Structure formats: C-alpha cells, structure tokens
Amino acid sequence: MTPDPRLRRNYAAAFSRFLFQPDEAALSAAYELGRQSLASGVSLLDIVLIHHDVVIETLSGIEGPQELAHAAATFLVEVLAPFDMTQRAFLEQRDVDDTAD
C-alpha cells in the first residue's frame, strides 16, 4: 500500500516547522498528526515509511546530521504516541479480561 500523498505533505510540513521551531506547539502538531492518522486507519508502517522519506529528503538541505537525527527521533516519537497509547490501552484491557475469566 502506498502512503497517502496528502499525509506525506502534511507530515513534511509539520516536520519542517519542528526543525525550525522545536517547541511544544510543533510537538503538539506532530501528536495531532499521529492522532488523526490513527483515527483514519493509517498503518504504523505507513507512518514509518513517510517519516523515512521525509528525513531522507531533508538530509540534502541540512548541515548537521546529528541534529537532524535527534530532531527526527523526537518528532517520530510524538507522532507515534497515539498509536502507543491505543496499544497500551488495548493490552491493559486484555489483561483485565483475562484475569476476570
């Protein structure tokens, strides 16, 4: 499955904004992007593919690869947070259901 081009554009724009202004508002935008992706049924693998493509594209225009790598990891963690929270809630509920049996 090919990731949605619109999602990729939105991801690239949010990531670029974060690189230039790495503040809480930019991380909030990343979190919201992840939340919307989860609600729309976007797969975690599509998010990772989009992230990889955007980082590779950004590498050509940045001088410090270490700074980019750190920023990319921080941004990806924020985007994936809604997926992680949903998975944890599912696993906790499953554990509760298993102990109730």
Image (spheres, helix red, strand yellow):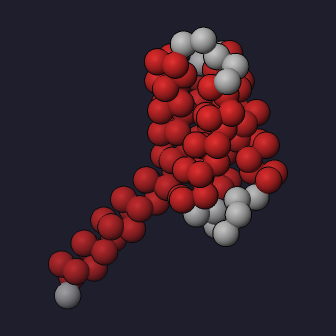
93 sits to left or right of 60: left
Residue name at image x 30 percent, y 65 percent? 92
- Taking the spot 49% from the left edge, 55% from the top edge, the residue there is 83
Q: Residue at x 47, y 32 (%)?
A: 73
Q: Is residue 99 above or below residue 19?
A: below
Q: Residue furthest bottom?
A: 101
User: Would residue 12 appear left or right of 96 to someone viewing this image?
Assistant: right
Question: In the rendered picture of this protein, how many numbered marks are placed on residues?
Answer: 0
Asked whether residue 32 appears in the rendered view, the answer is no
The furthest residue to the front: 60
Q: In x, y percent, where is residue 3?
A: 70, 59
Quadrant housing the C terminus: bottom left
Say if 24 sits above or below 64 in the image. Answer: below
Q: Is residue 44 left or right of residue 57?
A: left
The quadrant holding residue 97 is: bottom left
The residue positioned 51% from the left and 47% from the top of the image is 80
Quadrant in which the N terminus is drawn: bottom right
User: Could you say which quadrant of the image residue 30 lies in?
Assistant: top right
Q: Is residue 59 visible?
A: yes
Could you say which is closer to the camera, residue 43 or residue 27?
43
84 relative to 66, above or below: below
Q: Residue 84: x and y, percent?
A: 43, 53
Q: Residue 71: percent from the left, percent from the top?
A: 53, 24
